[in-house]
């Protein structure tokens, strides 16, 4: 590649940036200005001023520099050690230093209750799709105000469920922070990078990267590239984890070392700030006289993180047939059913396909999962009809789907070549074992369109072989009759 800033959207895999070992390997995109710590679900520590973190204890009688110790817990205190989530933050002022809460008006384009008894959500057995939603051109709309809910299941007060949103923003968040008290946000920018400030430090998240900001963590979103649009998967009552690798062994799919966490970065600003909280889908606001990003040091395992999707290590068949799409899973979240996840995040990125004597497109199937797909960039041919970057589609569980007849005919008539799949493209799937309902906003959107069922007008090829089949059936009948006659003797 040899460029100062590689074109990450057109590389086949991150390994391509290393030029066969001719250049020093680098773990960050060249235009990312921040530092990070690596490793999924590790226990980290970071301090912007050396010597701040107390050792041998978490909450000393006096913290150095007169800081305040504050613990953020995301699991029951008595949760098993491997499930216990918490971090200690050492900050200029504790988070409780604010002026109290006030109610904010409801955002009519967001939803939290996806139970069928809610008259504002809709059930559909029809495969649905949406063209890209428009980014506002008038007024200032930041990340929080630009949230639009599309589909989901459950309710955050039940502590199990999932919601899918999109955001369309044309302005940075100015002296404004956001806290999702309901669950974790997995954010996939599709257009324009997000410069995210969190209590733990800063992250730059570009199209082709994702980030996870967990329940209760404060953050603000700036738009360094101008207007931005993207997708969000929100989960309630669970946290994301890496899928088990099973027979794959110790490596493959998303490797834990490629997940990056911010380092401590603080500011001391005595100025008016507003912090917006989302709780049970309602929005509240509290005012305070200082920046919420005053954490000088922290340690723990409850930390926001990001991941570059071009580092995903694809696996697949090297003989015949497709392996199930679970091989594309980046992150998963458990439900209360041990055999069915609450949420999966899967990607379909550049890879080789070399299976022989195999129908190459996705096989026709019906499965128990709800499938919501989007396209970050490039083109993706695995949908029943074409969809654009920024668009999305939905299929509920047990509804049959697959490619159009023309695609089937072409793929089944030709020998499968050795080929690269999805070059210069990343599509993704938000998948869940739960049945989704559709929000009023998405149901009435002028971007909604339904799949044209005429694309599945398939030929009855069996009838073309009627005479041959009739002959086989007659021969079978004769053999059966002769056998019966011989047995009666």
Image (spheres, rainbow, N blue to C red):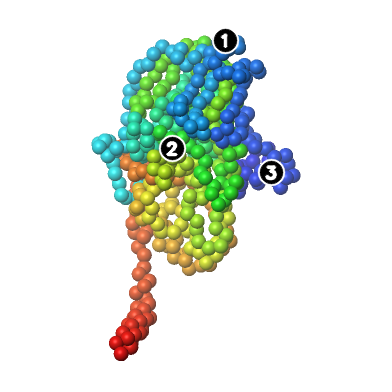
Residue at horizontal 61 percent and vertical 34 percent from the top: 38
Left or right: 471 in relation to 203: left
In the foreground, 178 or 194: 178
Cβ atoms at labels 1 and 3 below 8 Å apart = no
The span from disc 3 to disc 2 (Cα, nearest Å) is 32 Å
- Tell me: residue 171, above or below residue 392: above
Query: Mark 2 = which residue?
Result: 233
Residue at horizontal 30 percent and vertical 46 percent from the top: 124
Expressed as whole percent of the image width and height from the top left, the position of residue 425 reads: 53, 47
Expressed as whole percent of the image width and height from the top left, the position of residue 305 reads: 54, 32
Query: Mark 1 = which residue?
Result: 62
Query: Quadrant location of the C terminus?
Result: bottom left
Counting the numbered discs, the total is: 3
Q: Quadrant of residue 353?
A: bottom right
Residue at horizontal 44 percent and vertical 40 percent from the top: 334
In the foreground, 456 or 447: 456
Q: Residue furthest bottom?
A: 489
Q: Earlier in the sequence, mark 3 or mark 2?
A: 3
Determine the secondary structure under disc 1.
Answer: loop
Determine the secondary structure under disc 2.
Answer: strand
Q: Quadrant of residue 208?
A: top right
- Tell me: residue 91, above or below residue 260: above
């Amino acid at each position: 590649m040899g460029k100062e800033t590689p074109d990450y959207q057109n590389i086949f895999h991150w390994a391509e940036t290393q030029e066969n070992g001719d250049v020093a390997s680098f773990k960050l995109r060249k235009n990312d200005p921040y530092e990070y710590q690596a490793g999924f679900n590790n226990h980290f520590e970071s301090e912007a001023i050396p010597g701040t973190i107390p050792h041998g204890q978490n909450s000393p009688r006096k913290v150095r520099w007169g800081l305040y110790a504050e613990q953020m817990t995301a699991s029951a205190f008595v949760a098993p050690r491997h499930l216990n989530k918490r971090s200690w933050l050492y900050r200029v002022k504790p988070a409780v230093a604010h002026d109290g809460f006030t109610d904010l008006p409801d955002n009519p384009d967001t939803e939290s209750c996806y139970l069928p008894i809610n008259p504002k959500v809709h059930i559909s057995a029809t495969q649905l799709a949406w063209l890209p939603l428009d980014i506002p051109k008038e007024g200032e709309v930041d990340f929080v105000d630009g949230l639009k809910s599309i589909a989901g299941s459950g309710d955050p007060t039940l502590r199990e469920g999932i919601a899918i949103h999109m955001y369309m923003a044309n302005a940075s968040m100015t002296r404004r922070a956001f806290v999702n008290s309901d669950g974790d946000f997995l954010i996939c920018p599709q257009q324009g990078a997000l410069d995210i400030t969190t209590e733990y430090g800063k992250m730059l998240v570009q199209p082709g990267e994702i980030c996870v900001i967990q329940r209760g963590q404060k953050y603000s979103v700036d738009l360094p590239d101008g207007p931005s649009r993207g997708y969000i998967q929100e989960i309630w009552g669970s946290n994301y984890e890496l899928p088990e690798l099973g027979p794959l062994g110790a490596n493959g799919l998303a490797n834990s070392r490629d997940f990056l966490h911010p380092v401590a970065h603080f500011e001391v600003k005595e100025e008016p700030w507003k912090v917006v909280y989302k709780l049970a889908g309602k929005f509240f606001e509290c005012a305070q006289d200082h920046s919420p990003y005053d954490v000088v040091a922290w340690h723990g395992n409850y930390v926001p993180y990001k991941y570059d999707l071009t580092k995903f290590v694809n696996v697949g068949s090297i003989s015949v047939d497709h392996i199930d799409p679970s091989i594309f899973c980046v992150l998963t979240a458990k439900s209360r059913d041990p055999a069915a996840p609450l949420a999966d995040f899967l990607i379909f990125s550049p890879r080789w396909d070399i299976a022989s004597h195999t129908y190459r497109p996705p096989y026709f199937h019906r499965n128990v999962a709800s499938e919501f797909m989007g396209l970050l960039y490039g083109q993706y041919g695995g949908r029943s009809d074409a969809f654009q970057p920024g668009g999305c589609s939905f299929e509920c569980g047990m509804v049959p789907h697959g490619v159009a007849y023309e695609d089937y005919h072409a793929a089944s008539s030709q020998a499968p070549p050795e080929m690269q799949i999805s070059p210069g493209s990343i599509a993704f799937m938000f998948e869940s074992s739960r049945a989704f309902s559709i929000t009023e906003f998405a149901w009435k959107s002028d971007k909604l369109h339904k799949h044209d069922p005429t694309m599945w007008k398939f030929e009855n090829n069996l009838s073309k072989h009627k005479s041959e089949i009739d002959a086989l059936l007659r021969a079978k009948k004769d053999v059966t009759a002769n056998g019966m006659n011989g047995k009666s003797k």
